[in-house]
């Protein structure tokens, strides 16, 4: 009996799969059958569960909001198709294939976490669907892939920015903490070390480098070692999940030097978790909520704050990037005048001085946002506040 | 390395070690009685941290009431899991019940991601625990000092329960010989429930102390501590409460010392626990304090 | 007698027909006559998962060794393929932080050579691991193999000059046709089935049922356990290599120990100790997870948005279904049986309410 039941369970799963396929087949066909449908679909693939579930959902928030504000292009309604890639590479490839094959999206936005973006890269390249990464900073994402673009700046740039800022503010020695197992953190950390050494012209200016493991929560041992080296500044690029733990533990150990991080730190979770210890941290980011660089930024900050309500007091940087990624795609579709993948791609590549929330955007030949300005912020009274703008010649 | 740095590292080790110890007791007790690696224990711990967040932040209860509430709800969760996921499999092969434990762990993680999203939540501030103290150049939070003390007190409580009370006697009987204990009229289900009550309560206390020290609450926070605490339990001799605590301390100290003395090997810190585990399993599978178990044919 | 012979003939021709139909479906899919990339990708993934799951079932289901090391062995296979098949000229760009070790930097191997090498390396490591740990009993073995799997992952994270550490390796040449995944899957599974039906396989099952009795019967416990473990690891390595090639990228994080749980769940669904069940399980899980995506999408009924349908609900449903399976259908789809004509006929007869045939003869196993 039990076996029979299990068989039924299983059969129903398989059957429902086929019906689902059939349903999915019939849905778009009914729309596309009438020649040009009145909906333009843009795919969003983001990690909503798994390790990066947090960042992914914040990014989706920004994209959804953008869609709410700018819901039309070429006189048609834009529909977002959001799929979860579970922070898993295998899942990411099926999710993207699904977007392309089943949902027939004209462009894709995503994903938080460079690993999944790289995994999806080949499929995107083969099916010639232009894709706009919002916050995937690993150089490998766009390298050799003419259909992958991104709205954020890269690890090398950001590492350079932070090194420049640290030296400008008088630091001679630095300690670096990286997350061994996270490409973002490793990339940023290594480029910081490289720039810092070059700028100080001193091979020994980095007094300590430490790596910790994915999911580590205890940094006391690492920080104690660093404390004994007494650096002028600590650079600890890490996720918004880990950052507050590092900050809190460093302060508890009596480390008083500035602690710096990357764009991931501009996240309400950092202040929420680290509390008063977050005061005085330094981070590089794309835009300044209180001094919007562009008109777009001004209306975004106002509108999205209202949208978020009380749930999150501060706009996460990834949400702003998600918003920009969506606008860039929309702008390209508008200029291309069609939904053809290659036409949109060419239009994105030809983007000129696009005014987004995170600044004025152009693209390099590689498909990366060509930004040479980064905003440096700190935390004061539980708010991110602007302190400086750093310009770096690349 | 200066003396101060060394003492600081020592304090770090004791602090993390006592947290491991607290959670390891839950593992070791469940294993002692059910012969089950309760893979869901780390996730029960995670849920306890969320309960704390909700009771203090969303319902703004004072911390002392919140802690009681958290312990109660975690205990209920633990017992419910036992009733639903483990009890029906009591006579099934051990592999089945372990798979069920993995399933529960998977379920709790997904449920937490769904309900609370993956965005980390800040653990509420318990004012007196998070105060910083500076003793002779060593900086410590009050939580760091309090944790080992609480761990020792709770260990003594557990030892008292298992050695001096009637239910404790029943627990020992069940862990020695399940079948005979049942024949002797011991209410197996009650004994097992009690074990889960104690284990979950300790996990709840562990979660509160963990949160005070590492105030980031997220759905996957229980995975690594869960595994490491199991390693601690094996190291101390699985089924032996005192052993679990000693194992926890050794593991915590070892991890710190690797980072302190061999900074080049920090990347291998997580591997340390597993290497210890494998060495113990190969050299002395019963652990430091475990009793020799002969296989019955 | 005549009837029986006729029946056998019919069954055989039906089996052949099914195989032909199956092959032609793959051919049609592969030549892109039917289906789309979405279906192809799910099937490719399913085939790879089938290899790994069947290999895991060999160890767990047939030999009764509770091993949770599959993710680690897959990592070995995947990284071998990644390190040796990426074109040499691309490597400088990929290893942009720490250059690749000159020992391997200029070696480029054909895909199949790298794939087999990956499998062999995984098997070699498994023998080294197996020597000490296979003496351990059930749950101790589980936790020890899980520990080794994590150690392997951590080593890969730290071997930056070979594996590029956390950054991972991308631009791994892809798989041109479905025949590679399916071909390897078919060959691997046939090999495992033959092994299971050989004297070794009978020894494995004897160990599973009662290792002490098996030893008393003169079976060399240790030797057989190591063989089963190593072959399991070999095919896990092959599966990992195929996965690396299918995804085009690998990094150590992907082989976190929780990955092993996926395969464990597949074999539980399919039935511990059933090859055909495991194969069905692999495809059902891969496709099922995709199907369940409808739960992630917002659902509006009569203009009211049902709030429970949002991101993450899919995984809750999936894990809930798994719990139901573990608790109430412990045998999974197939239990320890294999798919056979008798079984299929049995189902039809039972549904028609006909009495089941008493004697169960050996039908043609697919």
Image (spheres, rainbow, N blue to C red):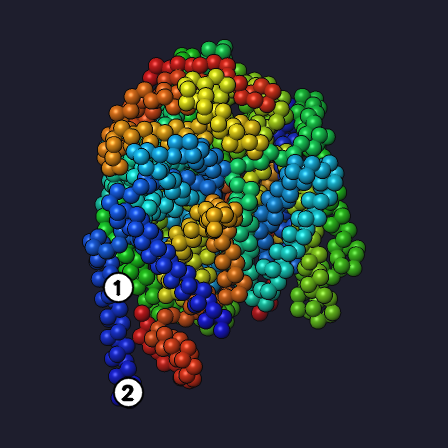
User: Residue B84 lies in what quarter of the image?
Assistant: bottom right
Both labels 1 and 2 in a single chain: yes
Q: How many marks?
A: 2
Q: Which residue is mark 1?
A: C22
Is residue C198 visible in the rendered structure shown here? yes
Q: Is residue C246 visible?
A: no
Kindly identify which residue carries mark 2: C3
Nearest the camera: C13 or A23?
A23
Q: Is residue B286 left or right of residue A185?
A: right
Q: Is residue A6 left or right of residue B116?
A: left
Q: Is residue B165 above or below residue A110?
A: below
Choose the circle earlier in sequence order: 1 or 2: 2
Viewer-proximal residue among C195 and C258: C258
**Position of C232 compared to C137: left or right?**
left
Residue located 58% across and 47% down the image: B43
Quarter of image, res C191: bottom left
From this view, report whether residue B219 is shown above or below residue C334. Answer: above
Q: Quadrant of the C terminus of chain A?
A: top left
């Amino acid at each position: 009996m039990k076996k029979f039941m299990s068989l039924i369970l299983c059969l129903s799963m398989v059957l429902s799969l086929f019906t689902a396929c059939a349903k999915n087949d019939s849905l778009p066909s009914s729309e596309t059958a009438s020649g040009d449908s009145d909906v333009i679909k843009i795919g969003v693939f983001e990690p909503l569960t798994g390790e990066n579930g947090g960042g992914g959902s914040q990014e989706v928030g920004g994209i959804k909001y953008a869609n709410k504000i700018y819901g039309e292009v070429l006189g048609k309604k834009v529909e977002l198709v959001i799929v979860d890639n579970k922070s898993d590479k295998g899942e990411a490839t099926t999710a993207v294939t699904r977007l392309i094959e089943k949902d027939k999206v004209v462009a894709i936005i995503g994903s938080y976490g460079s690993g999944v973006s790289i995994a999806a890269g080949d499929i995107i390249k083969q099916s010639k669907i232009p894709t706009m990464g919002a916050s995937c900073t690993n150089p490998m994402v766009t390298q050799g892939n003419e259909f992958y673009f991104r709205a954020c700046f890269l690890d090398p740039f950001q590492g350079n920015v932070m090194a420049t800022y640290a030296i400008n503010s008088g630091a001679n020695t630095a300690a670096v903490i990286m997350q061994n197992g996270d490409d973002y953190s490793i990339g940023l950390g290594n480029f910081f070390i490289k720039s810092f050494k070059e700028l100080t012209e001193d091979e020994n200016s980095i007094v300590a480098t430490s790596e910790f493991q994915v999911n580590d929560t205890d940094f006391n041992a690492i920080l104690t070692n660093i404390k004994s080296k007494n650096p002028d500044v600590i650079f600890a690029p890490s996720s918004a999940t880990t950052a507050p733990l590092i900050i809190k533990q460093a302060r508890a150990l009596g480390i008083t030097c500035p602690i710096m991080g990357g764009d991931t730190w501009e996240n309400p979770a950092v202040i929420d978790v680290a509390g008063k210890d977050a005061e005085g941290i330094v981070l590089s980011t794309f835009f300044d909520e209180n001094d919007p660089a562009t008109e777009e930024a001004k209306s975004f900050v106002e509108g999205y704050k209202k949208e978020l309500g009380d749930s999150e007091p501060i706009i996460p940087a990834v949400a702003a990037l998600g918003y920009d990624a969506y606008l860039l795609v929309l702008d390209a579709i508008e200029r291309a005048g069609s939904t053809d993948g290659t036409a949109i791609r060419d239009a994105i590549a030809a983007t000129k001085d696009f005014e987004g929330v995170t600044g004025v955007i152009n693209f390099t030949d590689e498909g990366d946002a060509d930004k040479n300005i980064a905003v440096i912020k700190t935390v004061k009274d539980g708010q991110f506040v602007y302190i400086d703008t750093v310009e770096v010649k690349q | 390395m200066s003396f101060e740095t060394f003492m600081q590292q020592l304090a770090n080790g004791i602090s993390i070690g006592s947290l491991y110890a607290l959670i390891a007791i839950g593992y070791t007790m469940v294993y002692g009685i059910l012969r089950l690696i309760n893979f869901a224990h780390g996730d029960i711990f995670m849920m306890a941290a969320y309960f704390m967040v909700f009771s203090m932040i969303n319902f703004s209860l004072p911390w002392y009431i919140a802690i009681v509430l958290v312990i109660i709800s975690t205990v209920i969760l633990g017992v419910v899991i036992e009733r639903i996921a483990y009890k029906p499999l009591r006579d099934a092969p051990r592999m089945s019940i372990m798979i069920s434990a993995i399933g529960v762990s998977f379920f709790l993680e997904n449920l937490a991601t769904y309900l609370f999203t993956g965005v980390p939540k800040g653990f509420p501030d318990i004012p007196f625990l998070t105060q910083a103290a500076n003793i002779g150049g060593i900086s410590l939070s009050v939580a760091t000092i309090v944790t080992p003390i609480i761990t020792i007190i709770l260990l003594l409580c557990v030892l008292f329960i298992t050695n001096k009370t009637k239910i404790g006697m029943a627990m020992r009987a069940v862990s020695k010989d399940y079948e005979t204990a049942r024949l002797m009229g011991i209410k197996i289900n009650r004994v097992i429930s009690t074990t889960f009550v104690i284990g979950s309560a300790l996990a709840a206390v562990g979660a509160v102390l963990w949160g005070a020290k590492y105030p980031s609450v997220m759905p996957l926070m229980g995975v690594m501590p869960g595994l490491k605490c199991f390693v601690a339990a094996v190291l101390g001799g699985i089924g032996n409460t005192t052993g679990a605590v000693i194992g926890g301390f050794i593991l915590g100290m070892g991890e710190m010392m690797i980072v302190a003395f061999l900074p080049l090997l920090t990347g291998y810190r997580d591997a340390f626990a597993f290497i210890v585990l494998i060495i113990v399993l190969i050299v002395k599978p019963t652990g430091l304090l475990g009793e020799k178990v002969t296989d019955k044919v | 007698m005549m009837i029986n012979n006729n029946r056998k003939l019919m069954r055989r021709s039906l089996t052949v027909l099914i195989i032909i139909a199956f092959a032609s479906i793959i051919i049609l899919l592969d030549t892109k006559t039917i289906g789309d990339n979405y279906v192809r990708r799910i099937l490719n993934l399913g085939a790879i998962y089938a290899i790994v799951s069947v290999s895991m079932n060999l160890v767990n289901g047939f030999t009764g060794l509770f091993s949770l090391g599959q993710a680690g062995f897959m990592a070995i296979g995947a990284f071998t393929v990644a390190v040796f098949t990426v074109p040499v000229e691309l490597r400088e760009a990929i290893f942009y932080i720490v250059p690749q070790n000159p020992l391997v930097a200029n070696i480029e191997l054909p895909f199949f050579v790298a794939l087999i090498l990956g499998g062999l390396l995984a098997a070699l490591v498994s023998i080294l691991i197996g020597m000490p740990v296979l003496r351990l009993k059930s749950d101790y073995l589980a936790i020890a193999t899980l520990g080794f799997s994590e150690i392997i992952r951590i080593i890969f994270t730290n071997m930056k000059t070979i594996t590029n550490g956390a950054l991972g390796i991308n631009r791994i040449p892809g798989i041109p046709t479905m025949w590679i995944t399916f071909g390897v899957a078919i060959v691997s599974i046939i090999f495992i089935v033959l092994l299971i039906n050989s004297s070794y396989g009978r020894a494995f099952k004897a160990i599973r049922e009662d290792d002490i009795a098996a030893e008393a019967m003169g079976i060399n416990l240790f030797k057989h356990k190591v063989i089963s473990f190593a072959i399991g690891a070999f095919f896990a390595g092959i599966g990992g290599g195929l996965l690396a090639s299918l995804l085009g990228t690998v990094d150590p994080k992907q082989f976190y120990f929780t990955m092993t749980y996926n395969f464990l769940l597949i074999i539980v669904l399919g039935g511990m100790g059933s090859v055909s069940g495991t194969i069905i399980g692999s495809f059902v899980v891969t496709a099922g997870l995709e199907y369940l995506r409808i739960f992630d999408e917002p659902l509006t009924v009569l203009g009211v948005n049902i709030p429970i349908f949002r991101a993450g609900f899919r995984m809750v449903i999936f894990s809930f279904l798994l719990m139901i399976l573990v608790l109430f259908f412990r045998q999974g789809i197939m239990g320890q049986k294999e798919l056979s004509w008798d079984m299929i006929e049995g189902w039809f007869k039972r549904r028609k309410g006909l009495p089941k045939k008493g004697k169960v003869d050996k039908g043609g196993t697919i």
